[in-house]
Amino acid sequence: MGMPEKKQKCPECAVPEYMLTYGDMVTLLLTFFVLMFTTATVDGYKLQLILAAFQGLGNFTGGNTLAEGRLAELGNNVESLPSLQAGRSLAQARRLAVSLFQPEIRTNVVRVTEDERGLVISLASDAFFEIASAEVKIEETREVLIKLSQLLGSPGLEDRLFRVEGHTDDEPTDPNGAWPTNWHLGSSRAVNTMMLLTDFGSPEEKFQVMTFGEFRPLVTNDTPEGRAYNRRVDVIILTEGNI
């Protein structure tokens, strides 16, 4: 009867074969999460450079491939990153506006809102203009207009356009005066505001000027308070859709 054969021992320092596959999987997971973290911090242009290296990937006709679904739409979603960046810059501008105009917001001289037009800085006409006039009370409002010009020149708004809108209440103006209708009064107030902002450093070529007269009220004109609320000049940092 022969001696039982001894089991061969694994060579020292040899790695089991399953560990190679496991190690590859861990490495890929690490790379995936690093890429996810990186895309959250880099700008859209750099991200597009990263994705350019993977242009050969996609859905192929043979073999085992990923079915179309959320992952297959990743490329399309990435293309929307510039608009996300634009939305982020508008949110930053709103935070800065609230910080800059905190005293004026408390006294209702300035209102900061956001709507389909973009970020809206509303200037109460009664605080900025003489009654039934387009003449700006420059001594009282100089500091506010300087801060507004600083806001329009803040980082992230380099490619934005700005619109200045004149709004009035429904009280008629003097037909024989300098502003025979509310259209004229709203237009003059918007132009004068825009010109002062350019005097304080805002680039003139980035502005649009509009008048709505009495036809875009925020509230009813039935009360003195409502009419005062409607008399305003809106300075708007436009969204891309309104450029």
Image: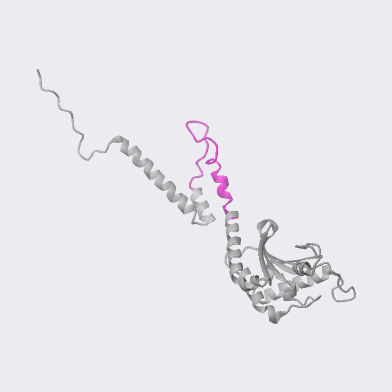
Q: Is residue 148 left or right of residue 28?
A: right
**Segment tinted magenta in the rendering:** 53-82
Tell me which secondary structure the magenta stretch mostly adopts.
loop
Q: Position of residue 73 (x, y in %)?
A: 56, 42
Quarter placement of the N terminus: top left
Instruction: Please tell me which residue is depicted at 54% across the width and 41% down the height of the picture.
Output: 70
Instruction: Please tell me which residue is depicted at 65% across the width and 73% down the height of the picture.
Output: 104
Residue placed most toward the observer, 184 or 207? 184
Q: Is residue 49 above or below residue 1?
A: below
Residue located farthest toward the bottom when viewing the structure as drawn: 139
Q: Is 192 part of what is drawn in magenta?
A: no
Residue located farthest toward the right when viewing the structure as drawn: 176
Quarter placement of the C terminus: bottom right
Q: Is 79 part of what is drawn in magenta?
A: yes
Q: Position of residue 218 (x, y in %)?
A: 75, 62
Residue placed most toward the observer, 182 or 19? 182
Instruction: Please tell me which residue is depicted at 85% across the width and 76% down the height of the picture.
Output: 178
Looking at the rendering, which quadrant does residue 92 occupy?
bottom right
Q: Position of residue 116 (x, y in %)?
A: 69, 57
Instruction: Please tell me which residue is depicted at 58% across the width and 54% down the height of the picture.
Output: 84
How many numbered markers are drawn? 0
